[in-house]
Image: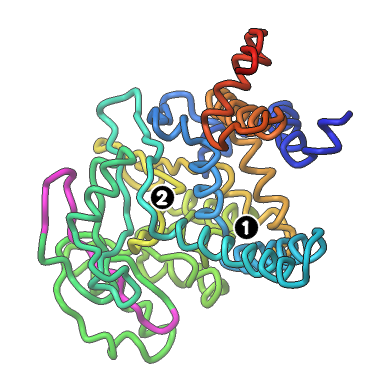
Amino acid sequence: MNLLRRYPITLALIALVLVSAFSPLPALVDAVSGAAPYDVELVRPAAYTASAPVSNVLDALTFLSLERARWFLIVWAIALAAWGAVRPGSARRRLLRAVGGIVALLLLAAATAVLPRPVVRLVPADSTLTVIDYHAHTARSHDGRPGWTVTDLAQWHAAQGFEASYVTDHNVILDQPTDEPIRLLPGVEWSVYGQHVVALGAVTVIDRATFNRDTPSMLGLFAELHRQGAIGIASLPEYWQNHWDDLDRFVAAGVDGFEIASCAPKAIAFPATARARVLELAEQHDLLVVGASDNHGWGKATCLWNLTSPSAHGYGANRVLVRPIALAQADWEPWTAAYTQPWLMLRGLSWSERSSWITWLLVILIYRAVPRRQGDPAGIGILARSLSLKVLKLRRPPEP
């Protein structure tokens, strides 16, 4: 009881890590069927597992929808500021704690966007399947990370198990193809009349003004892409937010497929009911359904992978495998993000990650709970002595 009173946060975290194991989430789900795939493995590097509390938190923040990210930051900023302000101490000390909590939160958000770190990697059991991304960007896009080159993009994909990716910069055609460390394929993301159309294949420059007058002119872009020998995919979130009532017209105009899941903050909240409607339409007309990392150089981890079969086409040509925490973004009200995102994260932990969490929490608990003798230094020295005295039951050496 004394430990519970003195270290409630640490003990509560240990309890949550254990309790969440009774309601686990699979590592991946199929965006079409909703079932967990059994022919792939999500490999976690040793460094990822060893640093699981950091790795998992940064991943969870990466997979927030835009609205949920705003609410997450607002609620936690208020909570940390209030916690710092009410703790004992002088007014100056309380103010520093309150401001320090907010600064730490902002630094965590920045680390999520730019900090290099280990990431998980998809490995399929069937070597004939290709792990591919249909939508990614470099610094040549207006909203791409400065300095984010095709080499950076290829390395980002390779680290996570992708074997190929289309480079679809905004209104800029890829002119630097590469085969190392993975194959980067030509494409472009045309922005026309409230819709982004991902063109896959070797395309030529178009006069966007021709397709930017109204919805009928925008739909004419699909015929133009077919004339060039490319295919056109309707991108999220634009068709959901701007052209939801035009989906049948997309099909009639020759759309080749739809994005049904995306890691983009504006698109990750695509609800399951809307996805079901698009899937029904795609299956009815044998259209391709894909997922998109929509990587712009911000954020280290992807929330999804595509498994494509070279012998299939249309609706059955591609499988979209998504991390459940990403698909769940639409299931909760944005204002709940401060507590639902951590809970989703904990439910998605593997047992190796849970072990890492509990180990780190116990180390912190032991370090803080074992009293120091007079003259003992702070740091790892006291921790090592505490472990030997309390865990191994060794006698304390006599005072000199």
Task: Tell me which residue sits at (32%, 70%) in the image.
Answer: 144
> In this image, 245 relative to 14: left or right?
left
Q: Amino acid at mark 1?
A: Pro
Task: Tell me which residue sits at (59%, 52%) in the image.
Answer: 276
Q: Quick one: SS at disc 1? A: loop
Q: Is residue 220 visible?
A: yes
The single residue placed furthest to the front in the displayed view is: 400
Part of the protein shown in magenta: 177-194
> In this image, 254 relative to 321: left or right?
left
| x and y, in percent, of residue 231 in the image | 27, 61
Seen from the viewer's position, the closer of residues 192 and 132 is 132
Seen from the viewer's position, the closer of residues 21 and 37 is 21
Q: What residue is pinned by disc 1? A: 271
| x and y, in percent, of residue 376 in the image | 60, 31
- For residue 74, which quarter of the picture? bottom right
| x and y, in percent, of residue 177 in the image | 11, 57
Seen from the viewer's position, the closer of residues 4 and 188 is 4
Q: Quick one: SS at disc 2? A: loop
In the picture shown, does residue 257 fall above or below 283? below
- Of the two numbered discs 2 and 1 in the rendering, the one whose residue sits closer to the viewer: 1
Label located before the other in sequence (2 or 1): 1
Q: Image quadrant for the C terminus?
A: top right
- For residue 361, which quarter of the picture? top right
> In this image, 395 relative to 9: left or right?
left
Query: How many other residues sit within 10 Å of disc 2, few (<14), some (14-19) or many (≥20)?
Result: some
Q: What residue is pinned by disc 2? A: 286
In the picture shown, does residue 186 fall above or below 22? below
Q: How is the image coloured?
A: rainbow
Q: Is residue 189 magenta?
A: yes
